């Protein structure tokens, strides 16, 4: 089992990076690793790991939904609230019905079995959509109108709807009937009549339990201080949110995934500093969870069931997306302030299938539903086609179809490479400049450019600078660069070329800054640089 876990993590990571360097989504490489290692080909994953695959996928989906909740923006949701609600119902329902009708004609299913297939295929994948939307938020695409937030919320709500209808249809098809309830007075409600109440209950209880969990976490982590660092904060938050998912499986009266996403959202609203710490921790957890999720997803794919349904399965998927889901997208955004380009973005941004299909695809076959093998084959096909396509299309088409706005760092983690520029000469002032630069770099995990502009040939002085940099920046990634030319111009040029966050430069003596810098190199850099300048005072 341990060897399998090591192989999954290492192969998944490196093949994912190879895919990324080939300008493909990393998940494509991870899924391929799963297919190669899985039972269909290499059989290189221990049975214990495969038996635990559902639990491991559940943990990974919990992590990504928590990230989604911590990244939601209440103001943007209020701005696009009705659109988000409609996106949670109409596209999924439209796709499910369109697939049901297509299956009746192409696969000779009855309507109930076709709708069962529609519920499996119509569900959207949080594992693809959530990181895609969070990346768009971190870059600013569509944030002015809250488009990523609307898609995130709609995706979670649509999965609640389809999972409920799926369970109802499964009971009906496997048992021939599905029991209702009898109210006082002898009035009986059928399962179809109960469905709206179940949906409201799942959503209402899910949001309510998310609110309670957020309050509990704030009380334990922020007010009572049971933890001493961010790692412990994430550990406790992971335990409670995973408990929500487990309880939802045992007591299916609320949506566990919606509860997790709501907990993150309410944490963001009620205690932003705690939410920011948790967001960083869940970002780190996702590095491992993503690999496990998509490698195990690939391992669950059964290649032998695809052959006979490949062509007709692609037609069914196309009808579901281009007819049913497209109609739902149009109706969802009707009357909104979305442009036609922003509406068109829903095609790449809101179509990916993966985790739900992997979880539900084999259930009809296991329960002996006629056509179960075909349902599994189409579910597998939807993963192979839409997951990598969606992961590629979201970042590719966002710049073409969405408008870029200002990023709100309080709502989403903005990851960027930070570079500092230390401008030094061969005087004793180089040591405090390098020391201050090292201090700043350690705080922000930054890289450093050590720049020396030569005004005269001084090999011993340059070598002494190299030695000082090597000693002071021993635990920091840095580059030592020597150039010739005008000192202020070369400093400003290097700052622009390397897109540095700050320039660190020194001044001599203890006289006021406005007196000592007149006509000096530091003054020239201050006046001409568009980057912030940190002045270090020498002895």
Image (tube, rainbow, N blue to C red):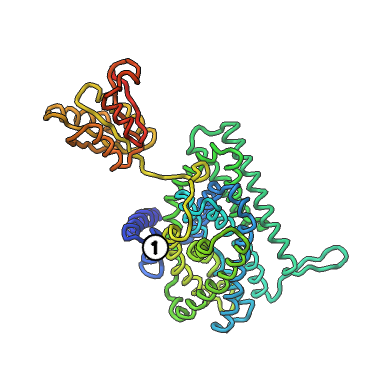
What is the crowding at mark 1: few (fewer than 14 residues within 10 Å), some, or many (at least 20)? many
Q: Which residue is mark 1?
A: 28
Residue at the front extreme, as displayed:
519
SS for callout 1:
helix
Q: Nearer the viewer, residue 230 or 242?
A: 230
- Quarter of the image that includes the N terminus: bottom left
Residue 269 percent across, percent down from the top left: 60, 42
Please identify the quarter of the rendering in which residue 220 is found.
top right
Left or right? Give the position of 266 relative to 461.
Answer: right
Residue 465 percent across, percent down from the top left: 19, 29
Residue 417 percent across, percent down from the top left: 36, 43
Number of numbered tags placed on the structure image = 1
- Quarter of the image that includes the C terminus: top left
Q: Against 366, is 276 above or below?
A: above
Identity of the residue drawn at 33% across and 31% down: 527
Left or right? Give the position of 348 relative to 518.
Answer: right
Please identify the quarter of the rendering in which residue 450 is found.
top left
Residue 424 percent across, percent down from the top left: 24, 29
Q: Against 241, is 253 above or below?
A: below
Identity of the residue drawn at 32% across and 24% down: 536
Q: Nearer the viewer, residue 230 or 37?
A: 230
Q: Nearer the viewer, residue 310 or 265?
A: 265
């Amino acid at each position: 089992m341990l060897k399998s876990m090591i192989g999954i993590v290492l192969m998944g990571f490196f093949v994912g990076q190879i895919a990324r360097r080939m300008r493909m989504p990393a998940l494509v490489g991870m899924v391929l690793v799963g297919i190669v290692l899985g039972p269909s080909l290499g059989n290189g994953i221990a049975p214990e790991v495969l038996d635990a695959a559902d639990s491991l996928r559940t943990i990974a989906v919990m992590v990504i939904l928590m990230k989604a909740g911590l990244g939601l923006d209440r103001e943007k949701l209020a701005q696009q609230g009705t659109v988000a609600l409609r996106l949670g119902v109409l596209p999924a329902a439209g796709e499910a019905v369109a697939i049901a009708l297509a299956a009746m004609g192409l696969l000779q299913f009855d309507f109930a079995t076709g709708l069962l297939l529609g519920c499996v295929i119509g569900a959207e994948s949080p594992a693809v959509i959530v990181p895609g939307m969070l990346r768009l938020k971190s870059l600013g695409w569509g944030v002015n109108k809250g488009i990523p937030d609307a898609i995130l919320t709609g995706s979670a709500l649509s999965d609640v709807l389809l999972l409920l209808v799926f369970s109802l249809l499964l009971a009906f098809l496997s048992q021939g009937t599905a029991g209702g309830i009898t109210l006082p007075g002898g009035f009986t409600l059928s399962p179809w009549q109960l469905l709206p109440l179940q949906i409201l209950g799942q959503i209402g209880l899910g949001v309510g339990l998310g609110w309670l969990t957020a309050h509990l976490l704030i009380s334990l982590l922020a007010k009572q201080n049971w933890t001493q660092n961010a790692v412990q904060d994430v550990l406790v938050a992971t335990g409670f949110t995973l408990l929500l998912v487990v309880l939802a499986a045992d007591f299916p009266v609320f949506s566990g995934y919606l509860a997790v996403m709501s907990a993150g959202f309410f944490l963001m609203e009620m205690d932003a500093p705690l939410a920011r710490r948790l967001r960083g921790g869940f970002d780190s957890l996702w590095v491992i969870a993503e690999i496990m999720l998509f490698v195990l997803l690939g391992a669950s794919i059964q290649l032998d069931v695809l052959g006979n349904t490949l062509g007709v399965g692609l037609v069914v998927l196309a009808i579901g997306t281009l007819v049913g889901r497209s109609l739902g997208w149009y109706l969802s955004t009707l009357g909104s302030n979305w442009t036609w380009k922003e509406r068109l973005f829903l095609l790449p941004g809101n179509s990916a299938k993966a985790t739900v299909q992997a979880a539900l695809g084999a259930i009809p076959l296991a329960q002996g539903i006629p056509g179960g093998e075909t349902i599994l084959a189409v579910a597998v096909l939807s993963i192979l086609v839409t997951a990598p396509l969606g992961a590629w299309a979201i970042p590719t088409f966002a710049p073409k179809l969405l408008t870029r706005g200002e990023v709100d760092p309080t709502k989403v983690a903005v990851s960027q490479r930070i570079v500092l520029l230390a401008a030094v000469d061969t005087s004793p002032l180089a040591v405090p400049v390098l020391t201050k630069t090292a201090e700043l770099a350690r705080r922000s995990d930054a890289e450093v450019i050590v720049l020396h502009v030569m005004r005269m040939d001084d090999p011993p002085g340059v070598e002494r600078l190299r030695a000082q940099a090597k000693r002071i920046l021993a635990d920091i990634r840095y580059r030592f660069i020597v150039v010739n030319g005008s000192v202020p111009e070369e400093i400003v040029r290097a700052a622009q070329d390397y897109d540095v966050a700050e320039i660190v430069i020194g001044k001599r003596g203890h006289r006021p800054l406005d007196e000592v810098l007149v006509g000096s190199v530091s003054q020239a850099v201050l006046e001409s640089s568009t980057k912030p300048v940190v002045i270090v005072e020498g002895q």
